[in-house]
Each structure stands twice: as C-alpha cells, then as structure tokens.
Image: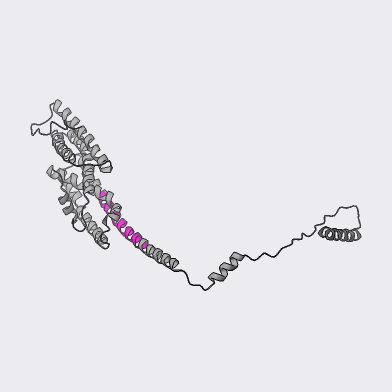
C-alpha cells in the first residue's frame, strides 16, 4: 500500500510539472520528500521499575554516605599534605642556595688560595643554614611522627651540607667531623629533629670525592706532604666504613666509590715518594689499603 501511495504522488507531481513547464523536453530535477515513519518506543520494564523503586526524592544509602565521608577526609588530608610539602620545599630551596654559596667559596681551596681566608668566607653560611634548619624543624614538629614521610624533600640538600661541613672540618683539624658535631653545627636535636644517620654517611662519602682533586692541586702548589695526610685519613675512614653491613643501595655505591678515591690518593703519594719529594714525617699511611678486597 505504501508503494501505491508513493506512485500516485509521483504521477501527480509529474503532471503538474508538465503543465507548468513550457519545454517538455528539458529535464527537471525533482526532489521528493523523504517519509520517515517513527514508531513509538516500547516502555522499558527495567527503567520503569528502577524509577518507581528509587524515586527522585529517595535518600542515599548508608554505603554511599560512608564512601563520600571517607573521600572527603582524604581530600582534606591530601590538601594539608600538599601545603606542608610546599612549605618544606621552599625552605629546601633556600638551603640549596646557601649551599651553592658555600661551594663557590670552597672552590678557591683548589686554586691554592689561603685556607684561613677561604674557610672564613665559607663559614659565613653556617649561620644561615642553622636558621633554615630550625625553620624546617618547626614545620615538621607540627605533624609528629611524620619525619620520614617528608624526609625526601630535603634529603639530598642535607647530604651536600654534611659533605661541605666535613671537608671544612678536615681542612682545619685533619680529622673526621662526627655525627654529633654535624648536628651541633646545624642546630639539630636527635630527640626532635635530628640528622639522619644515612644522610651523614652519604655526606662523608661525598666529602671523600673532593680529596683526590685537593691532593693533586696541593702537590702542584708544592705541598708534598699533603698526600700522606690525606692517605692516612682516607685509610682510617675506609676501614671504619668496612665495619658497617651495607646493602646494595645508594650508600653502598658511594662507599665503593671511596675505594677508588683512596687508590687515586695512593698513586699520587707513591709518585711523590718515588721522586724523593715526600717530606719526613709520620708514615702510618704509607701502607694504603693493601688489605682491601
């Protein structure tokens, strides 16, 4: 019946067009309307059941309320933690800036500069670092028991600070900066906000990396007794580190690097001694690390 209805409409349109068109031989494009039949959708039993059961004004279930309450607490915790990290990171950047100034001052040591003057200029940043660490301690004390949660935000800066303080201490005393002495210089307290043991050890390893360069430059400047002093210090330090049961982590890698620093200093010392340039003095460091594996 649909095809017959369409044929009747096409015939009527063609007749009307022929009567209106004076030239029956010219082709005329005729656009026929497209008929679309839309059938009413069948009611969904599931939709009707769900709408009738839930209702637009039905209260949420206890499970949904507990879920929303929990994640609302998580949101506040993450916001507070993010704000705290931003405060810690801003102080860590200031510590890094003071450390760079200290490093630039100590570089004059390798250029045969006067040691007392170089140390005096570098020591000017210790007071700044002490004040910054006090501010950092105040922030951490606001959240008791969270020290190691945020420890990574200032860890690398602290390791660098320890290495510089230890190098300066050796230039003055030719001895090792102890853990308690490093905490005292930075104004830290072990019971509240102290210096992490691993950070201290890694900082000491960083300090040993600077000694071979220092030895070479001192020998070039005519200080032929410097290799013997550094060799004795590194030998004792290396022996002390071997007492520790180190795992395969970053500290272990830095300790392995200390062995190569010791060998480089040994080479310089033996070269000076063979050439007859070594001065007469304590020779306890001449054996080097002959017993090392």
**Residue at horizontal 21 percent and vertical 44 percent from the top:** 204
**Residue at horizontal 40 percent and vertical 63 percent from the top:** 71
Q: Where, quadrant-wise, is the N terminus in this rendering?
A: bottom right
- Residue 231 visible at all: yes
Residue 285 rendering spot, x and y as whole percentages:
12, 34
Residue 154 rendering spot, x and y as whole percentages:
28, 53
Query: What is the magenta segment's predominant secondary structure?
Result: helix
With 112 as the anchor, is 82 left or right in this view? right
**Stretch in magenta:** 79-99
- Residue 101 visible at all: no
Classify 38 as above or below 283.
below
Residue 144 rendering spot, x and y as whole percentages:
25, 61
| Foreground pick, 95 / 181 | 181
Classify 89 as above or below 223.
below
Residue 247 rendering spot, x and y as whole percentages:
25, 42
Counting the numbered discs, the total is 0
Classify 228 as above or below 140.
above
With 71 as the anchor, is 156 left or right in this view? left
* Location of residue 291 (image quadrant): top left
Q: Where, quadrant-wise, is the C terminus in this rendering?
A: top left
């Amino acid at each position: 019946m649909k095809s017959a209805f369409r044929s009747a409409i096409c015939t009527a349109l063609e007749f009307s067009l022929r009567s209106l068109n004076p030239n029956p031989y010219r082709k005329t494009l005729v656009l026929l309307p497209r008929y679309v039949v839309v059938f009413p959708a069948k009611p969904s039993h599931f939709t009707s059941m769900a709408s009738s059961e839930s209702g637009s004004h039905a209260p949420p279930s206890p499970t949904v309320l507990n879920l929303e309450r929990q994640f609302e607490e998580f949101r506040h915790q993450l916001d507070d933690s993010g704000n705290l990290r931003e405060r810690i990171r801003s102080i860590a950047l200031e510590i890094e800036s003071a450390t760079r100034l200290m490093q630039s001052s100590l570089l004059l040591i390798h250029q045969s500069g006067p040691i007392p003057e170089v140390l005096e200029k570098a020591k000017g940043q210790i007071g700044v670092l002490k004040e910054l660490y006090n501010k950092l301690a105040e922030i951490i004390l606001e959240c008791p028991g969270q020290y190691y949660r945020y420890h990574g935000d200032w860890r690398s800066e602290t390791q660098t600070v320890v290495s510089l303080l230890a190098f300066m201490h050796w230039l003055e005393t030719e001895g090792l900066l102890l853990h308690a002495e490093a905490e005292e210089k930075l104004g830290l307290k072990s019971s509240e906000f102290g210096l992490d043991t691993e950070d201290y050890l890694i900082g000491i390893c960083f300090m040993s990396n600077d000694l071979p360069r220092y030895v070479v430059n001192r020998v070039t400047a005519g200080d032929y007794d410097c290799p013997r002093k550094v060799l004795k210090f590194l030998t004792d330090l290396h022996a002390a580190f071997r007492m520790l049961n180190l795992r395969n982590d970053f500290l272990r890698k830095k300790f392995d690097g200390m062995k190569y620093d010791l060998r480089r200093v040994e080479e310089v010392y033996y070269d000076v001694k063979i050439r007859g340039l070594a001065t007469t003095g304590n020779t306890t460091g001449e054996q080097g690390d002959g017993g090392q594996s």
